[in-house]
Image (tube, rainbow, N blue to C red):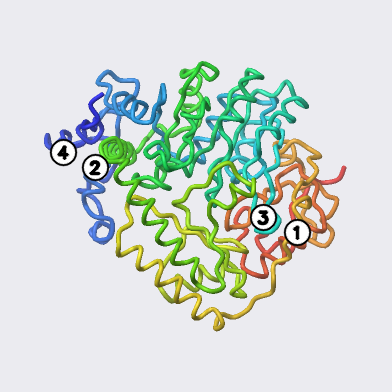
């Protein structure tokens, strides 16, 4: 296929060349009505390119096929049979993918270290989750993806399960044995969905971890805005084989997705594919060398432990994304959250993520010598000033088994059940009616339907005292918890 083409961008360019005046949405009419105070910040070109696909550029159900052409080019670029663009982010895409495999009341195997979007999908879709617990790294206090044998065991216990959702890479760059899990699923004649939100770059260089399509997954969801070059909310479904029908995926996406898709996102996805098809190997190669230089410098700084391929040698993960710079800062006497706050305030550097133990930075094709130096200098300054950072109450990190809570009710049933709010000190033994996801990193510690324990309450409340943000709990302070009412 001709990867020098970018059908969506070409259609936008033609639309602007023609100078069409639109008497429908969006109401700003390609920037004519935009407040200058807004365009001073966002730029007028954002509004000029904000065109409704229907009656403007194209629609996937109309005849010119602009979007279809762009999606076919994407599929060809990454080795998929089909690709579908989504403008609602992978939080919605993963809900669509799950609903394409299992319907209300049906079972689906799910990695328990999933993002809160997966828990939301379980509630919305009404599927019965069969949790596959991750491999816990006690020393690093980190969850790595489950292994093929973990999936095989759960499929034997639940032979009526409709498929498996695997999360890889994790936020911290550790990766699953996708092919091994795919083999297990396919032996049971069920599809493997891979939530590869952090893996949009993986198809474009052999030095990167396995790409889901190459590893025989059936359906892969990527967030191109995370490690790629598209704007926020850019997501793509990649599909192969016949275990998930393309028309089923389209219908489920139509059920949940917006009817006002953003041409800005479509154009950014189209342009990213063209850039990677033409220069992906070169750009990823440069990023890989840059990441290794950064990692080497940071390893020499006192008080830092930089994660790398040793986790593979230790048997904790199948692969590791070297573009993730993951640095444990506990030996500095601070948490990753404190480190991130200090870097933002004092060096104007925003890290990609943090938690109780570590910080992380993503190196992408967009980095250059300037950003490399800024990152290294900022972290070096953090090390030099760590003694000046105010100490906070410690987070009471639990043993891994403490996080494997009993599922007493289906998440959907618990979420919509009659509820009451109880003081935190009285919550142990009660069934949660809410999701409790500490940010960072956004993986729920408690899901609806799980039985709350004293150990988990202690962990969460110590985290709030230290600086956790609990955005989804009814009471973000966790002085009280939302639980299923007793009858």
Front in this rendered view, residue 193 or 478: 193
**Which residue is depicted at the point 56% across and 66% down?**
337
> In the image, residue 180 lies at what x, y percent?
60, 30
Q: Nearer the viewer, mark 4 or mark 3?
A: 4
Numbered label attached to residue 398: 1
Label 3 crowding class (10 Å Cα cut-off): few <14, some 14-19, many 20+?
some
* Distance Cα–Cα, label 2 vs label 1: 50 Å
* Distance Cα–Cα, label 4 vs label 3: 47 Å
- Looking at the image, residue 141 lies above or below residue 17: below
Q: Nearer the viewer, mark 1 or mark 4?
A: 1
Nearest to N terminus: mark 2 or mark 3: 2
* Distance Cα–Cα, label 2 vs label 4: 8 Å
> In the image, residue 21 lies at what x, y percent?
17, 37
Numbered label attached to residue 16: 4
Nearest to N terminus: mark 1 or mark 3: 1
Q: Secondary structure at mark 2?
A: loop
**Which residue is depicted at the point 85% across and 51% down?**
429
Q: List the residue tagged with mark 3.
A: 474
Marks 2 & 4, CB-CB < 8 Å contact:
yes
> In the image, residue 154 lies at what x, y percent?
73, 30
Nearest to N terminus: mark 1 or mark 4: 4
* Distance Cα–Cα, label 2 vs label 3: 39 Å
Nearest to N terminus: mark 2 or mark 4: 4
Front in this rendered view, residue 2 or 317: 317
Q: Secondary structure at mark 4?
A: helix
The N terminus sits in image quarter: top left
């Amino acid at each position: 296929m001709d990867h020098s083409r970018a059908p969506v961008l070409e259609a936008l360019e033609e639309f602007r060349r023609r100078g069409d005046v639109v008497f429908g949405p969006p109401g700003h009419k390609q920037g004519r009505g935009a407040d200058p105070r807004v365009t001073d910040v966002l730029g007028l070109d954002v509004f000029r390119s904000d065109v409704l696909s229907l009656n403007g550029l194209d629609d996937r159900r109309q005849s010119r096929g602009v979007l279809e052409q762009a999606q076919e080019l994407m599929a060809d670029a990454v080795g998929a049979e089909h690709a579908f663009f989504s403008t609602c982010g992978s939080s919605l895409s993963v809900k669509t993918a799950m609903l394409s495999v299992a319907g209300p009341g049906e079972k689906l195997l799910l990695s328990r270290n999933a993002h809160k979007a997966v828990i939301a999908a379980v509630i919305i879709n009404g599927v019965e989750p069969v949790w596959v617990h991750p491999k816990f790294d006690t020393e690093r206090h980190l969850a790595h993806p489950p292994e093929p044998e973990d999936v095989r065991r759960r499929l034997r216990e639940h032979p009526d399960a409709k498929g498996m959702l695997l999360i890889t890479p994790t936020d911290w760059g550790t990766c699953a044995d996708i092919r091994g899990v795919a083999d297990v699923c396919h032996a049971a004649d069920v599809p493997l969905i891979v939530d590869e939100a952090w893996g949009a770059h993986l198809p474009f260089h052999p030095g990167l971890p396995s790409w889901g399509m190459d590893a025989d997954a059936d359906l892969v969801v990527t967030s191109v805005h995370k490690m790629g070059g598209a704007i926020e909310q850019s997501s793509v479904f990649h599909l192969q084989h016949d275990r998930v029908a393309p028309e089923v995926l389209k219908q489920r996406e139509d059920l949940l997705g917006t009817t006002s898709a953003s041409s800005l996102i479509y154009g950014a996805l189209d342009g990213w594919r063209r850039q990677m098809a033409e220069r992906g190997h070169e750009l990823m190669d440069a990023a890989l060398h840059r990441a290794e230089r950064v990692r080497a410098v940071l390893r020499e700084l006192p008080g830092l432990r930089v994660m790398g391929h040793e986790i593979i040698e230790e048997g904790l993960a199948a692969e590791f994304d070297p573009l993730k710079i993951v640095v444990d800062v506990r030996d500095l006497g601070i948490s990753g959250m404190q480190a991130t706050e200090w870097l933002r305030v004092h060096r104007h550097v925003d890290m990609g993520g943090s938690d109780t133990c570590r910080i992380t930075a993503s190196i992408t094709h967009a980095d250059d010598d300037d950003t490399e130096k800024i990152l290294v200098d900022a972290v070096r300054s953090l090390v030099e000033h760590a003694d000046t950072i105010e100490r906070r109450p410690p987070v009471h990190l639990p043993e891994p088994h403490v996080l494997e809570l009993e599922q007493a009710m289906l998440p959907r049933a618990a979420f919509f059940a009659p509820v009451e709010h109880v003081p935190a000190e009285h919550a142990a033994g009660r069934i949660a009616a809410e999701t409790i996801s500490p940010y960072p990193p956004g993986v729920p510690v408690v899901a609806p339907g799980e039985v709350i324990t004293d150990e988990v309450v202690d962990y969460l409340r110590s985290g709030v005292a230290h600086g956790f943000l609990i955005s989804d709990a009814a009471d973000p302070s966790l002085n009280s918890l939302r639980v299923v009412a007793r009858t």
